[in-house]
């Protein structure tokens, strides 16, 4: 019985060691994806900011009469 307990203990120690490594790998993968998504969000925010500036400039040009549209 003692030998079986010893074997079981070693097997469980190895199991939890492997499970920990697997969990760390999964976490690293998740963190990498999170970083990539954060970079994409920053890029989208930058483009959105530029678009809002263009829209604001266009709307301002309508109110101050400096539209670039040709009158025909």
Image (spheres, rainbow, N blue to C red):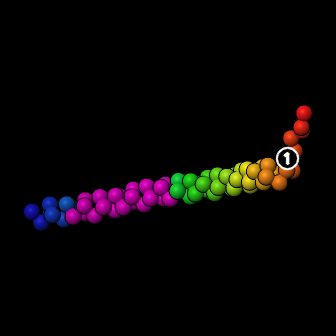
Furthest residue toward top: 72
45 to the left or right of 59: left
Residue on which the image places disc 1: 67
Q: Residue at x 61, y 52 (%)?
A: 40
Q: Residue at x 9, y 63 (%)?
A: 1
28 to the left or right of 5: right
Q: Point out residue 25 in the picture as x, y percentages from the top left corner.
A: 45, 57
**Label 1: which secondary element:** loop
Q: Residue at x 81, y 51 (%)?
A: 61
Q: Point out residue 30 in the picture as x, y percentages from the top left corner.
A: 47, 55
Looking at the image, how many numbered discs can be counted on the residues? 1
Tell me which segment is drawn in magenta: 9-31
- Let me know if residue 22 appears in the view: yes
Q: Point out residue 36 in the picture as x, y percentages from the top left corner.
A: 58, 54
Q: Quadrant of residue 2?
A: bottom left
Q: Point out residue 29 in the picture as x, y percentages from the top left corner.
A: 49, 54
52 to the left or right of 15: right
The quadrant of the rendering that contains the C terminus is top right
Task: Reply yes or no: does residue 20 show up in magenta.
Answer: yes
Q: Residue at x 85, y 50 (%)?
A: 65
């Amino acid at each position: 019985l003692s030998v079986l307990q010893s074997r079981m203990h070693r097997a469980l120690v190895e199991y939890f060691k492997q499970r920990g490594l697997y969990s760390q790998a999964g976490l690293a993968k998740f963190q990498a994806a999170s970083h990539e998504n954060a970079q994409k969000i920053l890029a989208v925010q930058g483009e959105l900011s530029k678009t809002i500036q263009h829209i604001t400039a266009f709307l301002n040009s309508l109110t101050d009469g400096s539209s670039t549209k040709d009158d025909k």
